[in-house]
Image: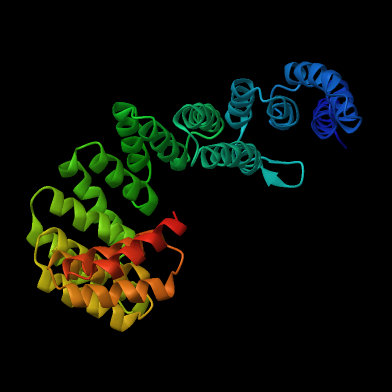
Amino acid sequence: MLQKSQYKVIIILVCGILFWGCPSEEYTSAKLYLQQKDFEKAEEFLVKAMAVEVDNPEIPFQLGHHIYGKDGRWAEMNEVYEKALAIDPNRKILDGSTVQDMINISRYGYWSDVYNKAVKVYNTSKGLDDQERNALIRDAINEFQTALIIKADESVNYTMLATCYFELGEADKSSEFISKAVEMAPEDFNANMAAGQIFARNNQPENAIPYLQKAVQLDPGNNAAIRNLAQTYYDIGDTEESIATYEKAIRISVDMKTKADLHFNLGVLYNQAGDFDASEDHFISALDLNPEDIEAILGMAQTFESNEKWRKAEKFYKQLIYLEPEVATHYRGIARVLLQQGRQDEAQRYFQKSKKYE
């Protein structure tokens, strides 16, 4: 038979189990108010419930997710989430997910809403006059800063803040934020690409090169990364490395469109360097791979014009007019090369046509 003391132990254990399995009156009331969408009362009783059930991480989670998060009270949300995690990040709550998982899901949901809103505001700024554009970019910065408060471990927060400050001409802030982005996500293509572009445009090409090299390493077929790296080498006077960057990319590329673009870019580079014969060769290669590549055709026309090969330039300007008959610059281009050949009447007709499409 059980001794009286043993009965006492059993009663205490049973009471403990019952207490653990049953929420407090305060938490029961809070959940009822949540169901009724009476969030003011729900907040009042969730706060009270936290004081009663100090070891229950579900309560601070509910307070953070349903009250503070929905109200945009991000600092308070983070505070109660930290309390829930401090109790036990691995305890299963609500639908059987852990505290850590529920908080991650909640934060990501709120963060994505704010972040996407910020991106939309930033994109709206494009094409506006400076005053309107800058005002919208400032609004986007505020939203990205909020996104940073909600979820500080997303490197894209820093990448976009860097981009915004760069657009506003605030070089120091843009450098600070993009450096943080790459520090957080050293293997992220977008962070490295943005860092390279920002440092290059902030007149720090030597700082840009390692990031652009990393971007090309992460995505060897990315034409924009290759072009930026090659151009940055060219900007610091390393034409040999610039050419080598394009030539290596051409060798490893298997996509014909990408290969055509790379030949075109290398043609532009040789044109900048004054090597018109090499420029011509690469524009021809680009056209062989993509016969209706407008940029390559324009590059050929301009290269032949720079090289004073008027007849060849005329041929490619005519091709441009055939493909894009409503672009004024094509008509002005052919007019220029006709003038160089002494064909004033024809040149005048093309000049007149260009005015129609201005």
Would residue 166 appear left or right of 141 to someone viewing this image? left
Nearest the eye: 170 or 116: 170
Would residue 343 appear left or right of 119 to someone viewing this image? left
The residue positioned 18% from the left and 67% from the top of the image is: 305
Nearest the eye: 143 or 311: 311
Nearest the eye: 100 or 286: 286
Image coordinates for residue 224, horizontal then vertical, percent: 33, 59
Image coordinates for residue 331, horizontal then vertical, percent: 35, 64
Quadrant of res 323: bottom left
Would residue 190 appear left or right of 89 to someone viewing this image? left
Image quarter in which the N terminus is found: top right
Query: What color scheme is it?
Result: rainbow
Residue 93 drawn above or below residue 225:
above
The residue positioned 35% from the left and 81% from the top of the image is: 291
Quadrant of res 239: bottom left
The residue positioned 34% from the left and 52% from the top of the image is: 187
Image coordinates for residue 253, horizontal then vertical, percent: 29, 75
Nearest the eye: 289 or 102: 289
